[in-house]
Image: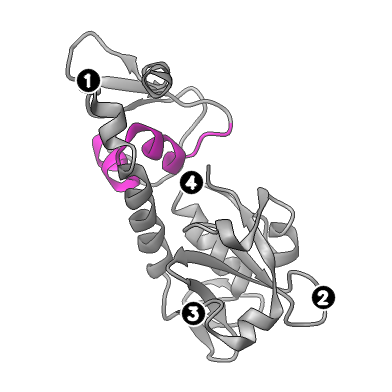
Amino acid sequence: MKATRILLTLLALTGTATAATYTVKPGDSLYSIAKKAGVDAPTLMKLNKLPSTTIQVGQTLNLGGTPAPAARPQAAAPAPVATGNATIRAAATRFLGARYVLGATGGGALDCSSYTMSVFRQLGINLPRTAAQQWRVGSAVSRRDLRAGDLVFFNTMGRTASHVGVYLGDGMMANANSYHGRTMIEPLFGNPYWANRYDGARRVLN
């Protein structure tokens, strides 16, 4: 019943039985709205003919349909997690293969923090520019509670959070790797280099 009340609060029904809308509130991102509505971000963009993931407070979004009665909220509960993982992986893989250049922010080249900025921009979230600044956003996450979309941080230069990547689930992360000279997906704790330099993680996706 609690899940049903939350879902009904999020969905403001229009005049028909087949359409539902949501008004963007401060702190919302396209990703978080899509997750709560049980759809993925690309579908939400298509429904609303959005050219990017950027949304505005007060904007009304079409969510594509009302929930089915009774059992639907419980039956659909696992779906947003799987959809979220796929959306995060799609955003992360979009920039794979870009050259690593310290201080670069685009044009075919990125560094570690501009890579995470680029990934999260696709999810409607603007991150600060440096790894140290990104270390101070969101909420701390323990290693055992990591989930796809968490920022993972490492001490690679003798100071906390000198490197950052995106956790993708299943023990893998995506990052701009200076040693290999490109953005790539690689093991997190399965790689002794990263495991020995791990600082912690921050969650910016609700």
Looking at numbered disc 4 in the image, what kind of residue is underneath it?
A: Gly
Looking at numbered disc 2 in the image, what kind of residue is underneath it?
A: Arg
Q: Is residue 98 left or right of residue 197?
A: left
The reply to whether dot 1 and dot 3 touch (C-beta < 8 Å) is no
Q: Label for residue 19? A: 1
Instruction: Mark 1 or mark 3: name the one nearer the start of the chain.
Output: 1
**x%, y% of residue 23?**
43, 22
Circle 3 sits on which residue?
187
Circle 2 sits on which residue?
159
Which residue is drawn at the image coordinates 49% and 72% (left, top)? 174
Q: Specify start and end residues of the magenta stretch as a single range.
A: 27-48
Between disc 2 and disc 1, the foreground one is 2
Which residue is drawn at the image coordinates 55% and 64% (left, top)? 116
Between disc 1 and disc 3, the foreground one is 3
What secondary structure prevails in the magenta region?
A: helix
Q: Quadrant of the N terminus?
A: top left
